[in-house]
Amino acid sequence: MKLSKEIEELERMLPNVSVKNTSISERGIDWHMDHSLTVINNVYDLLVKSNPKEYRWKFNFVRLVIFTKGSIPRGKARAPKAVNNKEEILISDVKDKLALAKTNLELLNSLPSGVFFNHPYFGNIKKDKTIKFLQMHTRHHYKIMKDILNTKG
């Protein structure tokens, strides 16, 4: 599963959590890591709590374009409050979220295919597309972190 590779790349960023560069992002690497891991863990929880019988497909043009392209454009959306940490981000919390994300990733495969979550821009997304979303989302933030590192000086 490619999402495991994305999580490993986040883990390799741990030594750089204090790096910031406002010319690339208002937020530092710590925020992007925390946000990415919070999204993975919160989405997993939503999948577990979902009732596949309540799933309703609805055409969504934005979802079609983003999923077809396979990447999320920068600066077009803002993180919802539930995944937008505005408090101080502690490395210990990031490490805990990382460990939980690894566990949740292992458990994700055992969930029924009909589970879903409701994304604020894309609507209802079933498990297979949710995994693709999490890959794209994590990759999106990883690229921002890489840019922060490559231009920190």
Image: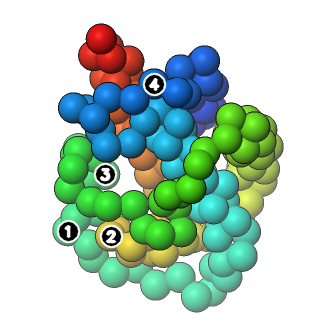
Q: Would you say the residues marked 3 and 1 are in contact, meaning their CB atoms lie under 8 Å apart?
A: no
Secondary structure beneath label 4: loop
Which mark is drawn over residue 121? 2
**Disc nearest the viewer among 1 and 2:** 2
Vertical placement of 122 versus 13: above or below? below
Quadrant containing the C terminus is top left
Q: Is residue 3 left or right of residue 92?
A: left
Secondary structure beneath label 1: helix
Q: Residues within 10 Å of mark 4 (few under 14, many from 20)?
A: some
**Which residue position is annotated with label 1?**
61
Q: Residues within 10 Å of mark 3 (few under 14, many from 20)?
A: some
Say which label, 3 or 2, has the lower sequence index: 3
**Disc nearest the viewer among 3 and 2:** 2
Q: Residues within 10 Å of mark 2 (few under 14, many from 20)?
A: few
Report, in whole angstroms, how far the alpha carbon at label 3 lies from the one at label 4. 30 Å
Amino acid type shown at disc 1? Phe
Q: Would you say the residues marked 1 and 2 are in contact, meaning their CB atoms lie under 8 Å apart?
A: no
Image coords of residue 134 (percent x, y): 50, 48
View extreme (bottom): residue: 54
Report, in whole angstroms, how far the alpha carbon at label 3 lies from the one at label 1. 10 Å
Amino acid type shown at disc 4? Val
Secondary structure beneath label 3: helix
Quarter-of-image position of residue 48: bottom right
**Which residue position is annotated with label 3?**
67
Residue that appears at 47% across and 69% down: 81
Q: Would you say the residues marked 2 and 4 are in contact, meaning their CB atoms lie under 8 Å apart?
A: no
**Disc nearest the viewer among 3 and 4:** 4
Query: Does the rendering let one see residue 61?
Result: yes
Residue that appears at 67% across and 82% down: 51
**Which residue position is annotated with label 4?**
19
